[in-house]
Image (cartoon, helix red, strand yellow):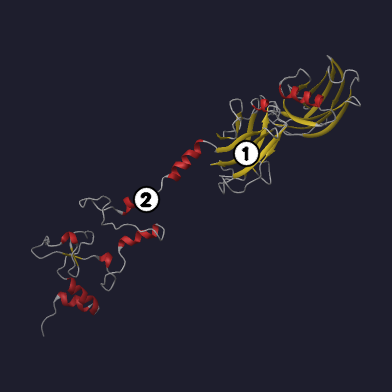
Amino acid sequence: MAPVTTEEAHFAEVPVSVAVFVHMLKGVDIYPESLNGKKKFGGEKTPEAHGKQTLSPSGGRSELHLDLEKRDLNGNFTSKSPTLQLKVRSSPDLDIPSLQAGFGSGGNQEAGTPESILSSQTPTPAVEKSQDKEGGLGTLYFSVEYNFEKKAFMVHIKEAQRLSPTDEQSLTSDPYIKLTLLPEKKHKVKTRVLRKTLDPAFDETFSFYGIPYARVSQLALHFMVLSFDRFSRDEVIGETLVPLADIDLSEGRVLMSRDIIKRNVRRSAGRGELLLSLCYQSTTSTLTVVVLKARHLPKTDSNGPSDPYVKVNLFQGKKRVCKKKTHVKKCAPNPVFNELFVFDLPSEDGLRDTSVELLLLDSDRTSRTPVIGRLLLGTSSPGTAGEHWREICDHPRRQIAKWHALSED
């Protein structure tokens, strides 16, 4: 009996099928990383390797290469080409060109790699849109015109685009627009709320009657874009101001667009604000002052909330004729008073020489500055205070409320 060699002893330990497969591969050089321009298993040749023979490093035997990625466990060629795997990243109807085809018309150009194909098909407008969006709060599109037959000034709010989101989770907003005609602020309107959108299409027209055409050039449009919030105060997205001095409406409708900018919040120098309601009764010659609430009050010397109250002084000329005060609100940076005071006025003079002083004070006796802020209402008062006073003089028996910035004492 012939002795058993080491090779035969090795094959005796493995299954017959594996041993046969190893015999088939015996003497074959396997280089799976190099598949182009080489002979493939089973005698197949690629177009690049047609008519060419490559010698193996060991000798003159022709070098065969096994394309393992194209065969299954049984040694058969798979039906799907590796190039078809790119369709997983694209839509089902999009055909990705073969990797062997060059992008140019010349035949000597290199074949495109999967990374280059995918990068060439990556859309860029989305990136540019996000960059544009970071630079502003959106754009408002609207038009203005004047109806000479009805003597009406008309504003058509068409749409807004690329608004800034107010909801951090859904990255969207529930926008609507408030429109005010300046400088009187008598005409105020607002659009409907559109849910979950950053590109709302309002398509609403507002008509303001009784405005002469000659007065339109003196007006200005103030658009405020807000996001509706059911559970708290609506959030301001931005605003835009459009003066009508240089707008010619004699030839019809004028289309316009304006960028939405951040709201310009003008507050006093840390003194807070006070909400008042005034009403002048000319028949009974009385003045009603309702102290409603205050907000944004500064902290005290101890760096804590104050204990505020309001003192109301009525002056006739330079003489104080009456004084009243509200209750103290403990530890309230935004106190709500809702207290009403009625003052009798001289019937023959009315509000001509009358003025009202309101002092917001801190009841803490240890405070070095008990006066938090001061407000004076009268005919000669500047800003919002004078405007509020003139409105109650022009509209008796009407309750008119306004916010007022407090000044230092």
Amino acid type of the residue that numbered disc 2 sits on in the rendered structure: Gln
Up the image or down, 161 lies above or below 214; here it is below
Residue placed most toward the observer, 226 or 20: 226
According to the picture, the residue beneath numbered tag 1 turns out to be 156
Identify the image quadrant of the N terminus.
Answer: bottom left
Secondary structure beneath dot 1 equals: strand
**Foreground pick, 148 / 10:** 148
Q: Which residue is farthest front?
A: 149
**Residue 20: image location, x then y, percent:** 20, 77
- 367 and 218: which one is in front? 218
Q: Compared to 367, does 120 lie above or below? A: below
Q: Amino acid at mark 1?
A: His
Residue at image coords 59%, 36%: 143
| Mark in front: 2 vs 1 | 1
Categorize mark 2 by other alpha carbons within 10 Å: few (<14), some (14-19), many (20+).
Answer: few
Q: Which mark is residue 121?
A: 2
